[in-house]
Amino acid sequence: MPTKKHFPGLLLPLLLLLLVLLLQLLPGWLLSLAQAQNPPASAPGLQVGQPLPDLLLPELVNSSRSSVRLSDFRGKLLLLDFYATWCSTSRSVMPRLDSLQRIFGQQLQILLVSYPAARDTRQTVENFLTEHRRPDGQPYALPSVVEDTSLVPLFPHEHIPHFAWITPDGKVGTLTGPEQVTEANIRRALAEGHMPPSMRHYDLDAPLWANKELPGHTRQYSFLHHGYLAGAPAGLRLRYKAGQISGAVLTNLSVLALYDVAKWQLYPAYGERGWILSKVDSADFFPEKSPLPPEAWKAQHLYSYDLQLPPGQADSLYRYLWEDLHRYSGYRATWEPRATECLALVRRGRRDRLHSKGGTPQNRLFRPEKPYLQNLPLSALLARLNTSNALGLLVVDATGYTQPVDLALSGDFDDLEILRRDLRRYGLDLVRQRRTVPLLVLRKVPAPDTVQAIR
């Protein structure tokens, strides 16, 4: 079983990545991470029923026009989609949005809104819209505002994608998540003026068991709720007290996604890889593989977990989550040696070109441009190599190198040859091998009588 490692310097980028990964596990349903997909909310913003000011949007891409005024959309139902190119849920709903735009034509305008707080630039948006297309190869029929500074303050939000529905007469109709953006809801809004209900907002700074709508008990440290929480985001939110982590709440995730949250922190080098499902129905974790309608699938297969930590035990958060899932989820994950095809990270030559020159530990391997690692172990590189790329194989560390390292890469983690060229500058290489390595095997176990975990 791999040695558990914690790297405080990696916490923020790993958590930022975490929602992306979870959302990839449940495309179409998981709203990214959490710890990842939480643009800062500021002023109260516009309320339902208030008119939308006639703003000029000067930066528009994927459109025949380079700029537009909001008044240009009068007479249409306008959906503002606040999104990010790196957010898996934002990406996963694009085909549906494109289809809806084509179905309703001039009656509807879906306008994507990208902004600096979501870490997107004009270039990243243009690259995204060039690379991501319809299955037939045609581009999305969705214009995007880029580097927005005027719409975001009007519609502050904590989770993306976030949708503002603007009525044909230019008023705020409702604010929703992506689940409510359906053909039926758009038809009702156009024909009858009835908007889908606004998202309910759970106070995730308070424990879930304190919510009067959920069953709860007193003096609990942890709580596992089975079923979909309408209006709650899908992802992870940490709580703080006196500057220290005091607990966490994870909402609307599958059991596999919950386990993956803990795995990312306890065994970061495995990234999003390393799982084997043994005699487990994948439809329990992936809605697209289930015959159930979406609402029924969510009710049966999503969970929410809340943990209030005892004082001084912030380092135990993910261990508690792992142990509670073992006890109460009906599943168990165990490390087992398995022979598998993988990419081994190996050293070439005798010269040490890796050793860190010191400085503040920094992991910038997940940023799109000029990624680098400073004064951190190779396990941080392994975490990046095992995440969100087209390599397709688990990358394992066969270097035996334990010292902190410095390295800078070109940023192309999808092309193996470019990646190998970058690594060779540091005396590293990736070699395809068949090795016996520890992998996480997820199995069902007899279900507990209750899914409320009481400590």
Image (spheres, rainbow, N blue to C red):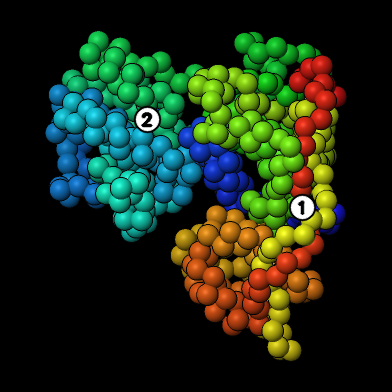
At which x and y percent is residue 109?
23, 32
The answer for how far apart the CA atoms under marks 1 and 2 are is 39 Å
Instruction: Where is residue 75? Give x, y as percent.
Output: 15, 24
Neighbour class for label 1 at 10 Å: few (<14), some, many (≥20)?
A: many
Up the image or down, 318 lies above or below 437; here it is above
Q: Secondary structure at mark 2?
A: strand
Quadrant in the rendering for residue 259: top right
Amino acid found under the numbered disc labelled 2: Phe
Q: Is residue 156 left or right of residue 206?
A: left
State yes or no: discs 1 and 2 in contact (Cβ < 8 Å). Answer: no
Q: Residues within 10 Å of mark 2 (few under 14, many from 20)?
A: many
Q: Which residue is mark 2?
A: 163
Give whichever of discs 1 and 2 has the lower sequence position: 2
Residue found at x 40% / y 52%: 120
Q: Residue furthest bottom?
A: 350
Q: Residue at x 37, y 26 (%)?
A: 181
Quadrant the N terminus occupies: bottom right
Mark 1 secondary-structure assignment: strand
Specify the quadrant that holds the C terminus: top right
Q: Identify residue type, mark 1.
A: Leu
Residue 41 visible to the viewer: no
Q: Residue at image x 53%, y 25%?
A: 291
Looking at the image, residue 346 lies above or below residue 138:
below
Asked whether the viewer can see residue 291, the reply is yes
What is the number of the mark on residue 237?
none
Mark sitting on residue 439: 1
The answer to whether 8 appears left or right of 363 in the picture is right
Instruction: Determine whether, in the image, residue 53 is placed left or right of residue 428.
Output: left
Measured as percent of width and height from the top left, residue 119 is found at 44, 51
